[in-house]
Image (cartoon, rainbow, N blue to C red):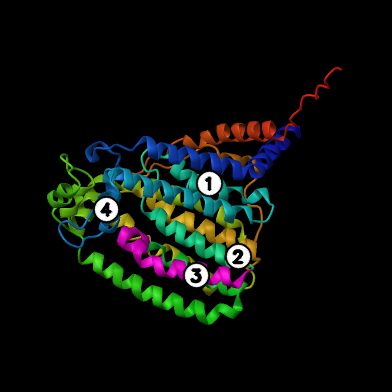
Amino acid sequence: MNRIPRLFETLERSLWCNRTAILALAGLLTLARMVWAYSAQPEQARYPVREMLVNYADGFVRRGLSGETALLLSDTFGGPPTAWATAMLVILGAALFAACIHLFRLMPNDPALLPFVLAPWGLMFLVYDPDVMIRKEAFGFVLLSILLIGALSRNTKTAIICLLFTCFLMPVAILLHEVNAALGGPLLIGAWLMTKRHPALTRSVIFCAIAASVASILATLSILTNSTANPALICAAIQDLWCHDPFAYFDDSMDNGRAFVQAQIPPSDRAITAVLLSLAALPFIGVRVTAAHPVTIVALALAVALPVLPLFVVAADYGRWIMILVFPSSLLIATALSLGVITYRRFLPHWATLLFCGSWSLYHYRVEPQAMGLLIWAFLLVAIALKFSLSRPIKSRPKQVPTP
């Protein structure tokens, strides 16, 4: 009778021990899909690549910095702007997977933490969703990961470099895509975690956090007042003859966005979204914070949640918004656990952990729960096969002694 529970425990342990290989394989697949989605013609490129080509042809506008960069690289070194946009996304994706894998490897050796690493709303969300791949919010995720790497570093110089890098580029991330402003709360919490590991840097952290916050607020205000543009001019700059999504949205106002959400997301889907959010939050029930006042815990949770909630009102990418809400929280949890600021008590039994990580998934647009999480078992098999093949000793042939 104990064989089935032991089987679940063994599978959970196997996923945990192979988490690095699984994430690495998943990252390589995601980047390969991005390269496969590339097209020399902008009208034939996939949505994430096209979104990178929004530019300032009609003046300063939200999301236009990446397109200006791609056009500058194209004019300087040659090649179509879509190739440079794809290259930037691939580099961004590689940096994101590498930074997150580093954070997850430093976590305490506890398989109960598996949902924070291989959850379908985390890095695996980028792998399972056939359309989202790497989008511009990955830039904000990378900055948060680098800040947390600095918080975990024993070297003060490394920590300050990570802090300065993050604070300097956060306003740039907002100019790339306004959704990165929603990561302001997690970044401030990450800065606070850095002071836990490096108390001597507290003044520097406070100064940098204030400066970055002011610059980020100014960047956010600038894009909110320059959110519309003439799509035809943007498309003409990259020689896009189709000029459809996402450029077509740049003559829409905020009211148009709210009306679109009202038309696309019925009350039944909002109810399903609430269920999915509750499901995504399940692993966090096991988090234990003993050294903080309950008011502090509530304030930290609100700092993460409040900047994201307006996204559900103005845009219909509900799967992405769930991911942006929960994924940064998992990175913060991983860092706080590594620092010993919090502890974790198993909440889900072994079978529930396997079900949570290896069955369901989210679709980025609207509310469509899917079962792409089953792919994790294929990644596990490949990881085990690679580990077995690499661990086998290579038999060398005996040297032949020449006969006299």
Q: Quadrant of the N terminus?
A: top right
- Based on the picture, tell me whether residue 221 belongs to the magenta stretch: no
Q: Which residue is mark 2?
A: 152
Residue 95 point in image, percent of width and height: 48, 52
SS category of the residue bearing label 2: helix
Residue 398 point in image, percent of width and height: 81, 24
Q: Which residue is mark 1?
A: 119
Q: Is residue 100 left or right of residue 363?
A: right
Q: Over which residues does the magenta segment extend? A: 155-181
Label the magenta part by its dominant secondary structure: helix
Quadrant assignment, res 314: bottom left
| Type of amino acid at the residue the image marks with label 3 | Leu
Label at residue 302: none
Q: Nearer the viewer, mark 4 or mark 1?
A: 4
Query: Label 3, label 4: how many angstroms apart (C-alpha)?
Result: 27 Å
Q: Which residue is mark 4?
A: 67
Q: Which residue is mark 3?
A: 163
Residue 316 point in image, percent of width and height: 30, 49
SS category of the residue bearing label 4: helix
Query: Label 2, label 1: how many angstroms apart (C-alpha)?
Result: 22 Å
Q: Is residue 82 left or right of residue 97?
A: left
